[in-house]
Image (cartoon, rainbow, N blue to C red):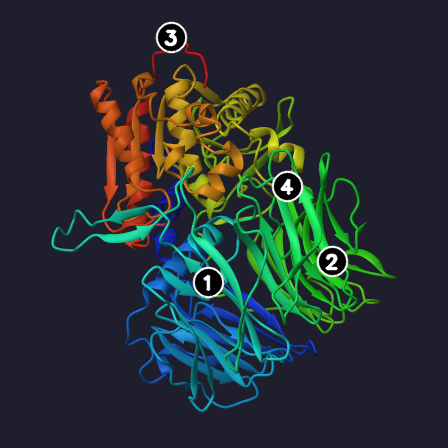
Amino acid sequence: MHSSTLTSEQSTNSADFPRQFARSRRFSLGVPRHFTVSPDGRRVLFVRTGSGTDPVGRLWQYEDGTERLLADPALLVGAGSGAVPEEERLRRERARERSVGVVSYATDDAARLVAFALSGALWAVRTDGGTPFSVPAAGPVVDPRPSPDGRYLAYVSRRCFHVVDLTGADRQLARAEGPEISYGLAEYAAAESMHRSRGYWWAPDSRHVLVARVDTSPVERRYLSDPADPTKPPQAIRYPAAGTANAEVTLELLSLDGERVEVEWDRKAYEYVVAAGWDAHGPLVTVQSRDQRIVRTLAVDPETGATEVLHERTDPAWVEIITGTPARTASGALVLPEDEGDTRYLTVGGQRVTPEGLQLCAVLGVEGERVLFTASDDPLETHVWCHDPGHGLRRLSREPGRYTGAARGGTVVLAGLTPRGNEVGVLRGTGTAGAAGTAGDPPYQALTSLAEEPSVTPRPVHLTLGARELRGVLYLPSWHEEGTGKLPVLLDPYGGPGMQVVGRARGWFTCVSQWFAEQGFAVLAVDGRGTPNRGPAWDKTIHGDQLGPALEDQVDALRAAAARCGDLDLTRVAIRGWSFGGFLAAAAVLYHPEIFHAAVAGAPPTDMRMYDTHWKERYLGHPEEQPENYERTSLIGHGHLLSRPLLLVHGLADDNVAAAHTLRLSAELLAAGKPHSVLPLPGATHLPADDAVNAQLLHFQRDFLMSALEGGVAPPPHRPGP
């Protein structure tokens, strides 16, 4: 079990991995991302940092097989000298952004003018030559976006909405009426739980904008302080906890001439604005009821603001939000998801265009009548597909992995997490009659990735486990020979909605699992009920209970894996996880100490009443109407059950899962006389950013688990499950 049993080379690689994992920001630095394809398909814009350890993002253009640097913050006079606006910092936190510099951008319709913000300053660059230039703005800039014709730049500053032309003539189209009002920004619930990070949308005529007005005054106020610096005043944030008031979101149609028209719908019945946009057919808005069982797609009259219901989706549990929908084709056909039985279909104009068993994941874009989307017919892979009338359905990504992409003008960018890591390629000639290329075909050309190669190579053994055919993967030490000895077991799940850790792809999480294996563990990762890409029926087995099925699946998978691999030592079983995975780890040692002998729980949501409205009410309902669901799922109130070593880790600046979740559970454990350990991370958010902290966290968890499992563990009496 000790690292001394490793070979010299393996030991060196394993020892370096935590530092490499941290300095590479989970191997995300140096990877091309955020793609825009020009209308003719000849040019691709993207962002990439300078190396696998350089966190500064730069703007690039790929054309005719050549990559050209468009904007480097280090070369721009005055760039980066100001502070990042608080609204931008929060936007990055919601997006889990790990880099600095150019982290996002937007273009006009021709992809000739690009706008981006650097430390609150407004910058633009033309893709046909020239250097980036600053554009005067009224204040610190957030989310700048060019008009479709490239004549104007819209942006948000101090929660007010502005439009400026390239000469610096600025117009404030909407002024925040108070400190709780903002125009053009996404509210917390939208950005964190609905996949909507935007708050305004240009009209095709470049003379009008659809803008969200957000009033957070009804929302519960929380305070984040820094105990490591008692001289720093606490920060007040608005957080909509389950069962409490949401922000009030309205939409306005603004013209550059100063006219304002409010969009009308039944906001009391449909308080969530899930998605919005403006295409050649007019503004399109999607709204959702508070209980999330009804979603309506609304057409908006741009003259009066009146709305018409184009489509309604209902579900007795909840209506799943699919990124990129609704959309419309050139002919006006609605592009929407549809759930039936075990399949989530893509529909165009009311007609299903995907077969049974192919699970729609997201719509990436619409060009003419062609729809580009991601879908999965195997839980271990996600691929890019396109549908085009007259040419049917085609899968564009060929090799195993999890892919996303962008397309226009017969060119497709495929960005995949493959068994070899992150890979990005450009496919040309993929028009309606063309065939997609693969890595060995002439139309395919790779974009350069500067990401570091992990010093640990995952050695996954894929398993299908138990009666529910749970997808799992087992990582064994590279130095272990089958039958030569028992290995302690470490379960390494996420286990909740929105994320899979099992697949035919090498991601940071697979590398971390293998690193723990090299320390002497047999590491098992399993995607249970409620995780994506198994269909609507699978998703909704957790309705009303986010704990029971998830924990049961981990137990069943462990037993099934041990029956397949005799080297797993079930007298020494640990579990670790972060966020939902941390919640699952803490629950495992509370409810099943006869199976789980130690746990590390990072940022665990222990009291479901303290988590946000949209995410938590989706699965558990309203806490006043279904309190039993919150009692069943929360760990608070059950701390007296602890009889195994438990390490709780939490960032004290976490505004997603507040540190109060861990501190309240710790206080309860202490009052019950239950020994446990707490590792607070001063200044850390839900995704700790400090490289030294992230490197040492892996060592700290390993050492805690090794100590807890050393010498075997005596079994306690069995307890009933949650």
Foreground mark, 1 or 4, reads 1
Classify mark 2: helix, strand or loop.
strand
Separation of marks 4 and 2 at Cα, in angstroms: 23 Å
Q: Name which of mark 4 and mark 2 comes first in the sequence.
A: 2
Q: Which residue is mark 1?
A: 213
Residue 518: image quadrant is top left
CB within 8 Å, label 1 to label 4: no
**Apparent side of residue 399 relative to residue 564 in the rendered image (left or right):** right
Separation of marks 1 and 3 at Cα, in angstroms: 56 Å
CB within 8 Å, label 4 to label 2: no
Q: Which residue is mark 2?
A: 334
Q: Name which of mark 1 and mark 3 comes first in the sequence.
A: 1
Of the residues shown, which amino acid type is indicated by label 1? Arg
Foreground mark, 3 or 4, reads 4
> What x and y, as percent, mark residue 631?
41, 24
**Apparent side of residue 445 relative to residue 169 in the rendered image (left or right):** right
Q: Which residue is mark 3?
A: 717
Classify mark 4: helix, strand or loop.
loop
Foreground mark, 2 or 3, reads 2
> Who's the residue at 55% across and 41% down the image?
500
Residue 533: numbered disc: 4
Separation of marks 2 and 3 at Cα, in angstroms: 57 Å
Q: Name which of mark 1 and mark 2 comes first in the sequence.
A: 1
One can see residue 413 in this view: no
